[in-house]
Image: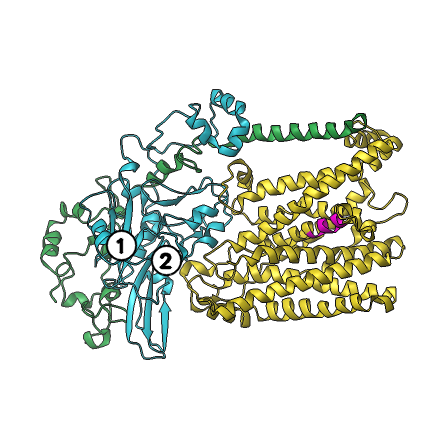
Chain colours: A yellow, B cyan, C green
């Protein structure tokens, strides 16, 4: 039984939205963030992102494939999860998930197909036996690799990326909306919530790619491109500034307005969430990377590649932690305070084993990297023959 | 006396809802697939292709839900905190231990502070309390689902498992509920919970199996002080309707605009 | 256009997939879904028959327990339903037939739930401080030595 300080409604002492609901926005954040990076090249033509355009698209795709898993694992009746698609109730923010997720999955899958189409055709021509049939099927039995066809591909990719970018923003903005639109819970109910989720998604996506890119470069024994690393650091810094500003603004607004809920929320932040909010989300995960990236951005010219790489990776790892703690503080924090606004329950500790446990969360975080490894086997993320193995880029330190 | 002594009798006359399908009906559905996707089966029903059956009243002869609209009144000055309602609810509805479809809160208020408690929902009554401040007033407040007209819980249900009937009762279809818990988060009154037995959302139904037979909800039936009153807004001479229409009634958390159908008499500002 | 054949081909795959989903979906929509709104209409009647009522009210008790019922009519508990103290009659009688024995709780705690003096209880409601009111040891049956529970005098 959880301990209650003050008074909580008797049904309010349970944390129904568990670790899986923390993992869900965390993983969708990577999807949206990685897609933003790939779009910077494909839509906005930022050449410095060319070396990681394919990598980030693959990352977005692989995280997207399992983005629905944490929700599925959390449901009281996982076998009924498909009802969200069969009888969607459209006044529910959650019902939008089925439609939005599927549409976005289709767009990303299409973009993957068009980006790797030449590789598929090449492989279909080169491979033998069963593998050959597989690639032929993947090419949909048309093998037009003429420059004109490639020009068509290029146009389609631009259009898909152009549609995909707002879709990615909507997919993640909507995750924030799920919380932001709950008027019953003052810790969630703010129009800032979707914006904060979206910006922190960009932060987590870029941070993830900064780390993965360095690891991949190490594995390929090819130095990371300096302009790419600097650009990642620059954009990461930019999004971090916005995120931290909005996260602080949310609290300051509540405090300054002396909202009826401020009394209990200030208690929540200084007691139950003291470590995960103030220490991790704001100081270790917020201020320190802000300073590190600030140094990288402002002293970029005078910096040796090793130092720049090191600082960026360090900041990125801390930011992966920051975004996780932000998800935790929103999802779990909102359930620690009772809607009576008179009481807090004791901190929630997730189980280790089981459907919604810590090990499952770790497995969920690792799975996309395994998928990326398999993806690379099927469709080389870096040109064939260079031996890039991004699948072993396990950045597990960002976890728990 | 444990609840297990009187297991639920077999469902009497409830239509089963298995996978049995009418293939002719499916043919019509297939033909208008795209329409159905966005409009649901409702489009079919109105175009005459839907399942045969009462379109206005699912009950047939036994009861007409168009002729009732229920409402509830709680007079906080009368409540003695005996917990009879909480016990009766548990016995009537097999509410799982540690969860509550209804409960009682006790408020002890003074100029320097306030204290609220609800030991086990008040199921065994309340012990004497001692508070650190000088108490000037104290009172007991029964709580339950407000059966809102503008239901935040129904609004967020992703699969349409939660709904409000035409006679004004908010219920959960436990065959459709996926157990996501969104409605539990969305209810400002803490009236819902995920049942550890069925893994679906559960809540007060105003004892729908009683009121459709003309009985009162179990909590109203056993209340020894008539703190809890249940009535029908569509009946001219209904005492509850008279109270709501002529007395000064209050609702909980009016700023959320949920339009509750559970009204309070003599509600204090401390109660949320 | 001749170099766009692959675009049309994948578009066709997409259209086929979406159509297949939309058609398959209709097979899984419950039969009564949407009859009265975006929910399964059949559930309304299911809820109305989820179980037989277990609390039957005091009127049903009178036919067998006439003495107690008559006592109750005249005393301080005339507005208190039998089931408040005795529990749901469904334990005892179902559909007119006796099912089991009704539990009778003679403990002082049962009386104390309503009549112990506590904070929050309305001042005018009859209530006592247990240690001051009961000279004897607090044990089962102690209240019944002086009070008739079916017709208590103030």
- Front-lying residue, A109 or A135: A109
Q: Which residues are magenta?
A: A33-40
Q: Compared with residue A27, is residue B176 higher up or lower down, i.e. above or below?
A: above
Residue A104 at x, y percent in the picture = 65, 42
- Look at 68% across and 55% down and name the residue there: A202
- Front-lying residue, B31 or A6: B31
Residue A35 at x, y percent in the picture = 71, 48
Q: Compared with residue A304, is residue C83 higher up or lower down, i.e. above or below?
A: above
Mark 2 is surrounded, within 10 Å at the Cα level, by few (under 14), some (14 to 19) or many (20 or more) other residues, namely few
- Look at 76% across and 61% down and name the residue there: A234
First in sequence: mark 2 or mark 1?
1
Question: What element does badge 1 sit on?
Answer: strand
Camera-near label (2 vs 1) is 2
Q: Chain of mark 2?
A: B
- Which numbered dot is residue B73? 1
Q: Chain of mark 1?
A: B
Q: Is residue A30 left or right of residue A73?
A: right
Q: Is residue B198 visible?
A: no
The question of residue C143 being in magenta is answered with: no
- Front-lying residue, B75 or A53: A53
Instruction: Check disc 2 and report the residue beneath it.
Output: B254
């Amino acid at each position: 039984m959880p301990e209650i300080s003050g008074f909580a409604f008797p049904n309010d002492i349970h944390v129904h939205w568990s670790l899986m609901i923390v993992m869900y926005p965390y993983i969708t954040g990577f999807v949206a963030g990685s897609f933003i990076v790939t779009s910077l090249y494909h839509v906005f033509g930022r050449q410095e992102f060319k070396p990681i355009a394919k990598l980030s698209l693959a990352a977005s795709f692989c995280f997207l494939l399992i983005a629905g898993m944490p929700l599925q694992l959390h449901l009281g009746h996982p076998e009924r999860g498909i009802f969200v698609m069969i009888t969607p109730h459209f006044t529910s923010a959650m019902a939008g998930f089925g439609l939005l997720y599927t549409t976005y999955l289709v767009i990303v899958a299409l973009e993957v197909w068009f980006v790797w189409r030449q590789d598929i055709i090449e492989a279909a021509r080169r491979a033998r036996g069963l593998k050959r049939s597989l690639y032929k099927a993947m090419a949909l039995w048309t093998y037009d690799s003429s420059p004109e066809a490639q020009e068509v591909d290029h146009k389609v990719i631009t259009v898909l990326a152009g549609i995909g970018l707002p879709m990615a923003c909507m997919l993640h903005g909507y995750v924030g909306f799920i919380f932001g639109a709950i008027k019953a819970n003052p810790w969630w109910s703010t129009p800032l919530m979707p914006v904060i989720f979206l910006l922190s998604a960009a932060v987590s996506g870029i941070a993830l790619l900064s780390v993965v890119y360095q690891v991949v470069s190490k594995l390929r024994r090819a130095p990371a491109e300096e302009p790419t690393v600097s650009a990642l650091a620059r954009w990461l810094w930019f999004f971090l500034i916005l995120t931290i500003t909005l996260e602080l603004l949310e609290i300051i607004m509540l405090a300054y307005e002396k909202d009826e809920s401020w009394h209990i929320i200030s208690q929540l932040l200084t007691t139950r969430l003291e470590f995960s909010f103030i220490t991790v989300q704001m100081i270790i995960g917020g201020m320190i990377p802000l300073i590190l990236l600030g140094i990288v951005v402002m002293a970029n010219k005078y910096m040796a590649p090793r130092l720049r790489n090191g600082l960026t990776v360090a900041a990125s790892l801390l930011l992966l932690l920051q975004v996780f703690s932000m998800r935790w503080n929103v999802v779990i924090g909102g359930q620690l305070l009772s809607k009576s606004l008179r009481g807090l329950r004791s901190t929630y500790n997730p189980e280790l084993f089981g459907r919604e446990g810590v090990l499952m969360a770790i497995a969920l975080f690792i799975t996309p990297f395994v998928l990326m490894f398999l993806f690379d086997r099927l469709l080389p993320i870096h040109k064939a023959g260079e031996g890039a193995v991004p699948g072993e880029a396990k950045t597990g330190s960002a976890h728990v | 006396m444990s609840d297990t002594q009187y297991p639920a009798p077999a469902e009497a006359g409830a239509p089963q809802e298995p996978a049995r399908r009418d293939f002719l009906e499916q043919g019509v559905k297939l033909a208008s697939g795209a329409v159905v996707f966005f409009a649901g089966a409702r489009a079919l029903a109105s175009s005459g292709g839907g399942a045969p059956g009462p379109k206005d009243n699912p009950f047939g002869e036994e009861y007409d839900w168009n002729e009732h609209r229920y409402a509830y009144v709680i007079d906080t000055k009368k409540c003695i905190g005996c917990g009879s309602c909480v016990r009766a609810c548990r016995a009537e509805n097999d509410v799982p231990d540690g969860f509550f479809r209804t409960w009682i809160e006790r408020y002890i208020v003074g100029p320097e502070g306030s204290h609220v408690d609800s030991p086990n929902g008040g199921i065994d009554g309340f012990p004497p309390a001692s508070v650190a401040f000088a108490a000037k007033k104290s009172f007991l407040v029964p709580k339950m689902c407000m059966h809102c007209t503008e239901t935040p819980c129904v609004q967020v249900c992703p699969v349409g498992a939660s709904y409000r009937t035409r006679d004004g009762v908010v219920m959960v279809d436990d065959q459709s509920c996926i157990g996501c818990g969104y409605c539990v988060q969305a209810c400002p009154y803490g009236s819902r919970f995920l049942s550890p037995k069925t893994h679906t959302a559960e809540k007060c139904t105003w004892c729908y199996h009683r009121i459709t037979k003309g009985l009162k909800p179990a909590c109203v039936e056993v209340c020894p002080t008539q703190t809890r009153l249940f009535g029908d807004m569509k009946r001219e001479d209904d005492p509850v309707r008279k109270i709501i229409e002529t007395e000064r009634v209050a609702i909980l958390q009016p700023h959320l605009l949920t339009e509750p159908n559970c009204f309070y008499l003599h509600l204090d500002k401390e109660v949320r | 256009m001749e170099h766009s054949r692959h675009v049309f081909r994948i578009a066709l795959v997409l259209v086929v997939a979406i159509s297949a989903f939309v058609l398959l979906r209709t097979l899984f929509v419950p039969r009564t879904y949407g009859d009265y709104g975006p929910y399964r209409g059949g559930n309304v009647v299911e809820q109305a028959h989820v179980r037989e009522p277990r609390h039957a009210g005091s009127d049903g008790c009178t036919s067998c327990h006439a003495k107690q019922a008559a006592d109750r009519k005249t005393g301080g508990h005339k507005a208190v339903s039998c089931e408040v103290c005795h529990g749901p009659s469904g334990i005892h009688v179902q559909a007119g037939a006796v099912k089991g024995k009704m539990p009778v709780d003679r403990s002082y705690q049962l009386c104390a739930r309503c009549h112990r003096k506590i904070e929050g209880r309305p001042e005018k409601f009859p209530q006592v401080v247990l240690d001051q009111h009961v000279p004897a040891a607090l044990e089962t049956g102690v209240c019944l030595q002086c009070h008739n529970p079916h017709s208590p005098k103030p």
